[in-house]
Amino acid sequence: MLDAVRDGRPVLLAAPAGHGKTTLLDQYAATWQGPSAGLRFTADDRYGPGEVRAAVLARVRAPGTLLVLDDLHLLPDAAHTFELLAATLPADAHLLAAARPLPALNLSRAELAHTVVVGPDDLRLRWWEVDRLFTDVHGRPADPVLAWDATWLTGGWAAPLHEFLLCTRGLSRRQVRRTLTAPGVPFAVGYLDRQVLDELGPDLREFLMRVAIHPELTPAVCASADTPAARAEAAAMLRRAERAGALVRNGAGLVGEPLLRHLLVHRFATTSPDAPGVFTAAAARLRAAGDPLGAAWAAFLARDRPALHELMERHPVVIGAALPAHWHGILRAFAGPTPPVDLGEVRRIAEEFGIVVGGPETGVPTAVVAGPGGTEFPEFPGVPLDDEGRLAEALSRMGAGDYRAAIAGFDAFLGDRDGPLAAAAELFRALSCLLSGHGCDVRDVEKAAQRVAHTGPAWLGRLARAGLTLTGASEYRGEARAVRAACERLGDVWGGVLAGHMEACAAMLRGEPDPDLLTGSGRRLAAAGMAAAATWSLAYQALARAQRAEPGAEEIALRAERDAERWELPGALVIARCARLLADPGASDVDHDTLAEDAARLGIRLETFLRVRRDPAAPPPTAFDIRCFGGFAVRLAGKPLDLARLAPQSRVLFRVLALHAGRPVHREVLAAALWPDAPAHAAFHRLQTAVYKLRRFLEPGRGRRGTSAFVPFEDGAYRLRLPEGSYLDIAAAEDALARARRAAARGDAAREARTLRELLAVADALLLPETGPEEWVIEARERWADAAAEARARLAGRASYADRV
């Protein structure tokens, strides 16, 4: 969500204290590829919008600067300030801000129409993330049930979770659980008092204690009497609570953090003589509103045993599925004997709520649905198939490896749909793109995973997190392994084997085949009864061995071929034949052209799989020397390359990739830059041709099936990857400019002068003069001309100052 700033969209984090806003801003700014500047406001600041704008503009000097504003709510006019900055900042600046309550923005303004608001629900930790927090960050023993209970109680609120971990450090498992389930949340009471309640007046604290039993607050719910005056008074108190950050808006009402509500309800129940009457009235109101869980809690707090008994007898499954075992046990003990709860039904409802319930059945499919061609796939709880069967058809095509038909099916199913099914379809579409070898933008997969995490069910959220590993992004390399470990602790057999399969596939897709990992994945798939998926694993195993030139690859590939034909898995058949072609290029019954036609029909990018892993003992490729300033020139091992032998469009592509200094450039950006007037399909075809010719020029000995060492395709983008010891003058200029700015910020004049001279030695010439006034080079050419002019001016200023001294 924060990456929207890269597209020029303002982003605003709005959440109460303790949701990690400042930490998130700092971490994001640290990863920003370019200059950044920050302002953090305090309660003493009385700056008006114009003053803030002037201070900001003084810091936003370089193009592409990320501007980070923290605690925006402490300004007298936060909304006007944000609107002014969004409207008047330079077009190449990026605005990222954080506030506690969401400012009253006028989102109808054109400058704010594309603002991305990141709210408290976006910042919450999901239960599997809490499990990772416990085990991977704090080194605690694995306990998914404890992670779920902690998430349920805290609502995934980061700061109280941190307090819980701190106060239970070194305690036994029994002591940790006792701390979590103790009344009055003792582990977080100090934090809640300091950060939230102490900032409220006594009258507002008393008001919130009386109404905290209600999950959603409106003036009508909170009024002490059914009169206009009482409702107006309640509305005023709610506005105060919202401004103080104790409540956040949710549609027509306001909601508080679950943990804060828990503390307020406990204090009211233990300190106010009015509590029984208030809770009795709340139980009746919540029951009438169709909230049996809330009504049950209110009846328990009112000590109304008959009312609680009736509720638990009437709604046993809903109440049982929505509560952790400890709290459900408290209600059952007070209510007295009730009919036994159908645990299977509880699990089904719990999955619909996105809740994980322990036990070996968790996450196991409830039925198997037959798709076209005999392909079988599980019908998972919480995601019913659509009546028309379009989602079932697309899932079946995906399982068979017909990715082109699967993606078209998901697109047709999505249409204008919304909700859990649409989120699931978006996720499976992204996974199809990744598994086909074409890749897709990691941000698209992140968005799909985030949406699935919001809509549930829980098993699909785990699958989404594992799928991020397929993107090849470094930060997600261990995600599938971690999900597999969590699933194994939960008893989620299917989830564990699918996450393990994704882990093995990801290694293959990023060019690091691991036959042993694939062998283990195949054994787990077969043991779980997933015979079709095991065939996929066998095909990948054969391909991994063939890529590494290991013995036995052809034999395994033949077995995979037979199984793929038996299960009618055309995609796995293509992978198995890729393995045979790599293992024995002279095989008479495997024709490359026919294989390419089959792969194209299925939407499989053959080049991703027909590549040979380079022997680590082989000598590294020869170093390049590439110059862009003053004219485009390339030397290989000290000898100039004759660029005239390279096709004209491939020469232009070479310059564009060099201009980006090793950073990936999405194929859509390249196609639009080089062929702006051509239809998309024609531009992409020309781009593929230009890439092919450039690769052949740089690597004349490279076979058609080998991966490119210099122009790889990763996640939908091409980049120029040069061997160690190579030189690219644009990269050298960027490094010198960054070092000069750091020296200037430290006040180190001598170091700044040296690095500015290094910059001018490289970049004091026109960038790619042979290119002409093409749009893709103009901005970079002007930026480097300005940087060189500024460097000359600063050096001249320092020289004149030295003369005067």
Image (cartoon, rainbow, N blue to C red):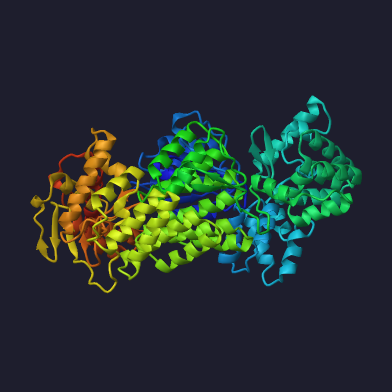
Q: Could you tell whether 412 is left or right of 162 in the image?
A: left
| Front one among 105 and 375 | 375
Q: How many marks?
A: 0
User: Residue 584 appears at what percent x and percent y?
Assistant: 26, 63
Q: Let me know if residue 285 appears in the view.
A: yes
**Residue 8, visible in the rendered structure:** no
Q: In the rendered view, tell whether residue 364 sits above or below residue 229.
A: below
Residue 603 found in image quarter: top left
**Residue 78 located left or right of residue 650:** right
Judged left or right of residue 310, residue 196 is left
393 to 612, vertically: above or below? above
Tell me the quadrant of the picture where the C terminus can be found: bottom left
Percent across and percent down for residue 438 are: 35, 48
Q: Residue 211's x, y, as percent?
A: 78, 41
Most extreme residue toward the top, as rendered?
A: 228
Task: Identify which residue, 790 or 733, lies in the foreground.
Answer: 733
Estimate the x, y position of residue 23 in percent, counting from the top left: 53, 56
Q: Is residue 100 above or below residue 390?
A: below
Q: Nearer the viewer, residue 613 or 793?
A: 613
Q: Is residue 306 above or below residue 325?
A: above
Residue located 68% across and 38% down the image: 254
Q: Residue at x 41, y 53 (%)?
A: 564
